[in-house]
């Protein structure tokens, strides 16, 4: 079995969480039916001929970390994501499934990576992996410099630190 070191692609960390990584990227189109929080949505895939409607898929956006719902700016992050994609046709690029059964991947609204947009607007951080600043580091740097969204305060608390101090939201 191949061992992956720190030079592995940043999203690999998310894939190995459950050991059920998707071998190749799976793509599907659908409609966003629900927003759970600032980095999780439900997408109902398009009907497949002869199979009718498919069950909505819970998708955790990779490459970013949005504030927890009960954390400052958490409800704003979820509302921004909802305003952007709720009831809209999107493309999902699924990379893996996590231990909670959520699909892990990116969400595209036309040719726009919704994760990149969330970070650029100051609704999430670029997910850090060790010394790697994550895939949306440039967007985060510009959002911080402009004081957008959660970066309007000098030192917003990372969700992982918030969870460590307060536990999960109810």
Image (tube, rainbow, N blue to C red):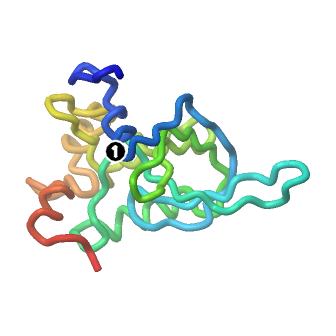
Query: Which residue is most to the front?
Result: 1
Q: Residue at x 46, y 42 (%)?
A: 20
SS label for mark 1: loop
> In front: 100, or 91?
100
In the picture shown, does residue 122 fall above or below 67?
above
Q: In which quarter of the image is residue 51?
A: bottom right
Q: Quadrant of residue 42?
A: bottom right
Q: Mark 1 points at which residue?
A: 17
**Residue 116: x %, y % from top left:** 41, 40
**Residue 110: x %, y % from top left:** 63, 40
Quarter of the image that includes the N terminus: top left
> In front: 77, or 56?
56
Query: Which residue is most to the right?
Result: 50
Q: Residue at x 76, y 52 (%)?
A: 46
Left-right relation of 72 to 154: right
In the picture shown, does residue 80 fall above or below 170?
above
Quarter of the image that includes the C terminus: bottom left
Query: Which residue is most to the bottom?
Result: 170
Q: Quadrant of residue 6?
A: top left
**Residue 84: x %, y % from top left:** 53, 57
Q: Which residue is drawn at 54% across and 38% down?
A: 112
Q: Crowding near pointer 1: few (<14 within 10 Å), some, many (20+)?
A: some
Left-right relation of 72 to 15: left
**Residue 24: x %, y % from top left:** 56, 29
Q: Residue at x 50, y 64 (%)?
A: 82
Give the total of numbered labels.
1
């Amino acid at each position: 079995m191949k061992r992956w070191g720190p030079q592995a692609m940043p999203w690999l960390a998310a894939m190995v969480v459950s050991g059920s990584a998707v071998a190749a990227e799976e793509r599907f189109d659908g409609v966003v039916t629900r927003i759970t929080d600032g980095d999780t949505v439900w997408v109902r895939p398009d009907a497949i001929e002869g199979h009718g409607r498919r069950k909505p898929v819970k998708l955790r956006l990779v490459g970013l970390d949005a504030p927890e719902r009960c954390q400052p700016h958490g409800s704003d992050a979820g509302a921004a994501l909802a305003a952007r994609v709720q009831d809209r046709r999107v493309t999902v690029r699924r990379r893996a499934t996590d231990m909670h059964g959520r699909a892990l991947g990116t969400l595209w609204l036309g040719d726009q990576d919704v994760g990149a947009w969330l970070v650029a607007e100051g609704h999430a951080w670029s997910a850090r992996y060790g010394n790697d600043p994550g895939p949306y580091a440039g967007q985060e740097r510009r959002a911080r410099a402009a004081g957008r969204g959660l970066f309007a305060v000098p030192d917003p608390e990372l969700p992982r630190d918030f969870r460590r101090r307060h536990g999960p939201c109810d």
